[in-house]
Image: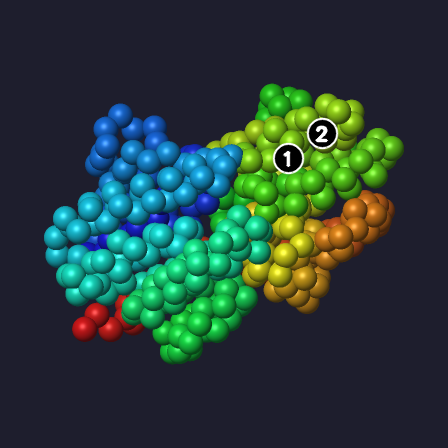
């Protein structure tokens, strides 16, 4: 089968960012499918460039995007990619199936056009419930725009041959639009047990980035967006400032990066170290040096449906997790005894839970083992990529 895979933020393990589409595409190719990835890359010289990565044919469009962009620049990026990808997608020949993976929701537009005008079926993957996320975050307030986007969302789901949601909450959000359960399934983000695992500390990496290997370290790694409760982490760090053997390591990039640097300087937070954005191999080494991993989001109902990469990479690394969303991640952490839930409105609760964990080394060991076991038996990419492959193979293309 010839598959056109549309993902605006496609990346590979040697670069920062989520790699779900990379692993899925490799699994599809391994099982006889031909995959062309249509993506954006603001760093290329030409408007369109063609390349190949481990068997994945890649079409890159010169469209810039960065998590630090404001709302209007983001919209410009989304719309630019929507039009350019539609034009390029329409030129592709003999495509049997389109896979379109959000966000943004506009990623469904080229798939919809190919379905309407070339009768090419598509699978739509929901990584966030748009437009509900930007609505609840206050980025979209105009009622007419909201109604148009909700109509577009339902249209995308309705015309898809199948919809894959990344969490139970996202699946419910799709079903609530009237889509039948028979065309929806849930495949969460993936653990990568061969990329994140527990081992001896890499002292060269620790020295290179001036990381103290004797402290109790809490790591946050991933997107530093407005939805990621970065202020909550910093407020909690302020309360722990007097605990000289506890520190926070923050890895990643995004809109809140400047706030982190300014707050650390203004409040003299010597217990917070912002290290920047790294490729997966370096991130894995740094996470391995830490005792606990953070998975935090702002206290909005829609964000409790999240399915973050950092959660599953933390499980792979054998790290106890701290979550602050009262959704399925809270249930996952508590039911599997691999982490704790902290009140998203109370930095004081966060502080107390950190101190409790630090003073319970035996508990940390048990939680870490449970995290790794969960990654190995339920969430590893070898399991979930196969599930995605089965979903694709079972789609009726007629």
Q: What secondary structure is found at the residue carrying circle 1?
A: strand
Image quarter hosting the N terminus: bottom left
Q: Which residue is mark 1?
A: 250
Q: How far apart, in angstroms, are the residues tagged by discs 2 and 1?
A: 13 Å
Q: Residue at x 39, y 60 (%)?
A: 148
Q: What secondary structure is found at the residue carrying circle 2?
A: helix
| Residue 199 rendering spot, x and y as whole percentages | 61, 40
Q: Is residue 304 depicted above or below 85 in this figure?
A: below
Image quarter hosting the C terminus: bottom left
Q: Residue at x 30, y 50 (%)?
A: 6
Q: Is residue 13 depicted above or below 311 in this figure?
A: above
Q: Which residue is mark 2?
A: 263
Judge whether residue 184 can be spotted in this image.
Answer: yes
Mark 1 is surrounded, within 10 Å at the Cα level, by few (under 14), some (14 to 19) or many (20 or more) other residues, namely many
Q: In the picture provided, is 72 more to the left or to the right than 307?
A: left
Q: Nearer the viewer, residue 301 or 187?
A: 301
């Amino acid at each position: 089968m010839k598959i056109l895979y549309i993902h605006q933020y496609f990346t590979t393990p040697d670069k920062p960012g989520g790699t779900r589409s990379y692993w899925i595409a490799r699994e599809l190719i391994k099982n006889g499918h031909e995959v062309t990835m249509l993506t954006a890359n603001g760093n290329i010289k030409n408007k369109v460039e063609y390349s190949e990565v481990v068997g994945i044919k890649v079409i890159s469009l010169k469209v810039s995007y960065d998590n630090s962009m404001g709302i209007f620049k983001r919209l410009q990026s989304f719309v630019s990619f929507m039009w350019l990808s539609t034009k390029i997608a329409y030129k592709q020949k003999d495509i049997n199936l389109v896979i379109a993976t959000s966000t943004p929701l506009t990623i469904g537009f080229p798939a919809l056009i190919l379905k309407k005008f070339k009768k090419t079926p598509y699978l739509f993957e929901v990584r966030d419930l748009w437009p509900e996320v930007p609505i609840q975050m206050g980025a979209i307030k105009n009622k007419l725009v909201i109604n148009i986007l909700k109509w577009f969302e339902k249209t995308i789901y309705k015309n898809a041959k199948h919809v894959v949601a990344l969490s139970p909450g996202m699946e419910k959000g799709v079903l609530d639009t009237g889509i039948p359960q028979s065309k929806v399934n849930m495949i969460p983000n993936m653990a990568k047990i061969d990329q994140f695992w527990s081992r001896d500390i890499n002292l060269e990496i620790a020295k290179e980035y001036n990381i103290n290997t004797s402290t109790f370290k809490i790591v946050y790694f991933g997107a530093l967006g407005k939805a990621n409760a970065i202020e909550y982490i910093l407020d909690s760090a302020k309360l722990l400032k007097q605990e000289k053997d506890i520190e926070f390591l923050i890895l990643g990039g995004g809109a809140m990066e400047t706030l982190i640097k300014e707050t650390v300087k203004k409040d003299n937070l010597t217990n917070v170290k912002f290290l920047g954005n790294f490729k997966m191999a370096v991130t894995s080494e740094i996470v391995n040096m830490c005792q606990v991993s953070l998975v935090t989001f702002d206290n909005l109902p829609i964000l409790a449906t999240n399915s973050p990469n950092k959660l599953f990479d933390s499980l792979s690394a054998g790290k106890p997790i701290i979550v602050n969303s009262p959704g399925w991640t809270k249930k996952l952490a508590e039911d599997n005894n691999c982490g704790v839930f902290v009140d998203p409105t109370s930095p004081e609760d966060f502080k107390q839970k950190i101190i409790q964990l630090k003073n319970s080394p035996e508990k940390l060991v048990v939680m870490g083992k449970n995290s790794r076991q969960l990654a190995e038996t339920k969430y590893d990419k070898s399991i979930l990529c196969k599930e995605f492959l089965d979903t694709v193979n079972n789609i009726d293309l007629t």
